[in-house]
Image (spheres, grey):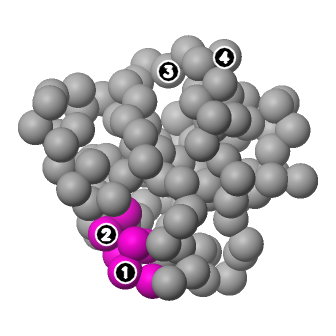
Amino acid sequence: MRSILAVDDSASMRKMVSFTLTGAGFHVVEAVDGQDAWEKAQNHSVDLVLTDQNMPKLDGLGLTRKLREHPKFKNTPILVLTTESSDAMKQAGRAAGATGWLVKPFDPGRLIEVINKVIR
């Protein structure tokens, strides 16, 4: 079973994402912010990271950069799921190493479609 690290500081958003992903057959590891995600990524085998951008302690782009610096996550798909939709933010995401950018509120079917396209 493929494992996804879902990172969001909003408990309700984590629940919605987790429900969607579990329903599609994925194992979900939840993290409350970028720092929590970094720690969990060290201890779990994850096939994809789905992260919010605006979070305390470590934001989505900071988490993406940190993951990309580690050999274990060089090729792990990282999707940013956020309310941020500006081209500047999307470019910053690409520069940090994000695989893709999705804007909230998300369409569950579209989320699964994108994940299935990029997951290995």
CA distance for labels 4 and 1: 31 Å
- Disc 1 marks which residue? 69
Whether residues under marks 2 and 4 lie with C-beta atoms below 8 angstroms apart, the answer is no
Residue 75, visible in the rendered structure: yes
Q: Is residue 77 above or below residue 69?
A: above
- Disc 4 marks which residue? 109
CA distance for labels 2 and 4: 28 Å
**Of callouts 2 and 3, which one flags the residue occurring earlier in the amino acid sequence?**
2
Name the side, left or right, on which 14 lies relative to 61. right
**Of callouts 2 and 4, which one flags the residue occurring earlier in the amino acid sequence?**
2
Graded by Cα atoms within 10 Å as few (under 14), some (14 to 19) or many (20 or more), the crowding at tag 1 reads few
Q: Is residue 21 above or below residue 85?
A: below
Residue 25 lies in the magenta stretch: no
CA distance for labels 1 and 2: 6 Å
Mark 4: secondary structure: helix
**Of callouts 3 and 1, which one flags the residue occurring earlier in the amino acid sequence?**
1
- Disc 3 marks which residue? 106
Mark 2: secondary structure: helix
**Of callouts 4 and 1, which one flags the residue occurring earlier in the amino acid sequence?**
1
CA distance for labels 4 and 3: 9 Å
